[in-house]
Image (spheres, rainbow, N blue to C red):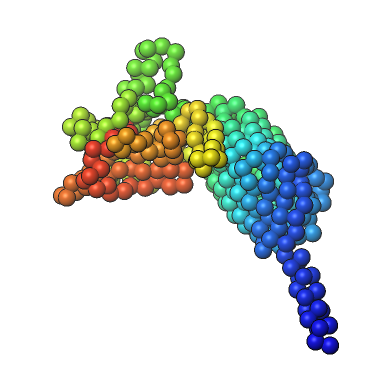
Amino acid sequence: MKHKLTLLIALITLGTSTLFAESGTCGDNLTWTFENGVLYISGYGGMINYNYAGGPWDSLSNSINKIVISRGVTSIGRSAFDGCSNLTSVTIPYGVTSIGSFAFDDCSSLSSIEIPNSVTSIGNLAFCSCKRLTSITIPYSVTSIEFRAFYNCTNLTSVAILNEKIRIGDNIFENCNSIQEILFPKGLDISRVSIPTKTRKIEFVFLKAQSRLAPYKSTSPKAESNMQNSYVDLDLPSKTLWKTQNEKDLYSFDRAVESFRNKLPTKEQWQELIDECTWIWVEPGEWNYYEEMEMYEHEGDLPFYIVIGKNGNTITLPAEGCIKETTCYGCGFFGGVYGLYCSSSETKDKAFYVMDFNESEQKLYKYDSEDRNDIYSIRLVYK
């Protein structure tokens, strides 16, 4: 009797475990695994386009809380995650180029999603009824977005569209009645997107990053000179104007203070820029992964922030990093990960403040006196 009971318990345990771990294929070279509420998609290539019933994990859709898509996946198939009503988190890697129609339809618990700067197309009703989604940025890489892509996202309050040449389908924000603000580049016609009449429309002039490593290319020396010497009013409370370009060299703290004096921004002016403006991260180039060294390297123009004032005027701040002895942080080996900009503010113990940003945050840090000889990006102000 004891042996029979032990066998029965083992069978029950085995049966229970199969409820919490499932797997299969979802493309020619893609596999999926579900375990403890997380759906993992891995491999290489594009996902299968599914019918309206959803992907092969459809029977588990109410149990999926998180989706992790690995680098190597190039597309998210039609209706792939349709009806995953308890989904709260999605990781979409750089390299995905398309998000299919109905891909996240009725993912009603999804409160945020980051679309990587490799996606070129978003299908119709792709994010329909994502009712907890509060903000969305359509990156510069997206060249087409189909009709009603964000239909019925009733809590969506903030929208940013970065590509001035994007092809927009009809009514992409229909029934998104909570939208308070939409940022879009000058020249883009948004008359068909279907937003509430009360929505604040901020039209900005899009300029790619002007930096020492990714210089602005003008059509004439005179235009280049004008750009290099021009300042922008971002409608800041202090009335500070910000220069449109970085200085052509990197500078140590002491050299920067000596060279630029009151044109070098204080930590208070940097903090005002953080607090009063909208910051949008843009990655115009590509990331390559070198498995043998377990590192990513950026190719092409450096990533940068578009900083948008309340009046719609903009500046761009490239992630040039800094040079510490012989190592370049943020450029070269670390390829555009960090922007480090010198301020003029220092303390009695010779520490000083640096504006330090990456993809996820912008913050002022107090650097030790031993870092005064490292060299940083410089952006000037005028008041």
Q: Position of residue 357 (x, y in %)?
A: 40, 43
Vertical position of residue 95 compared to residue 156: above or below = above
The residue lying toward the viewer, choosing from 36 and 381, is 36
Q: Quadrant of residue 210?
A: top left
Q: Is residue 347 visible?
A: yes
Q: Is residue 168 visible?
A: no
- Asked if residue 236 lies left or right of residue 180, the reply is left
- Asked if residue 171 lies left or right of residue 318, the reply is right
Residue drawn 44% across the image and 18% down it: 217
Residue drawn 63% across the image and 46% down it: 70
Q: Position of residue 242 (x, y in %)?
A: 33, 33
The residue lying toward the viewer, choosing from 265 and 89, is 89
* Furthest-front residue in this view: 3
Q: Position of residue 82 (x, y in %)?
A: 74, 51
Q: Quadrant of the C terminus?
A: top left
Vertical position of residue 191 compared to residue 85: above or below = above
The residue lying toward the viewer, choosing from 25 and 358, is 25
* Furthest-bottom residue in this view: 1
* Furthest-left residue in this view: 348
- Asked if residue 154 lies left or right of residue 50, the reply is left
Q: Position of residue 147 (x, y in %)?
A: 72, 38
Q: Quadrant of the N terminus?
A: bottom right
Residue drawn 33% across the image and 47% down it: 364
Q: Please tell me how many numbered marks the rendered image carries.
A: 0
Residue drawn 49% across the image and 35% down it: 297
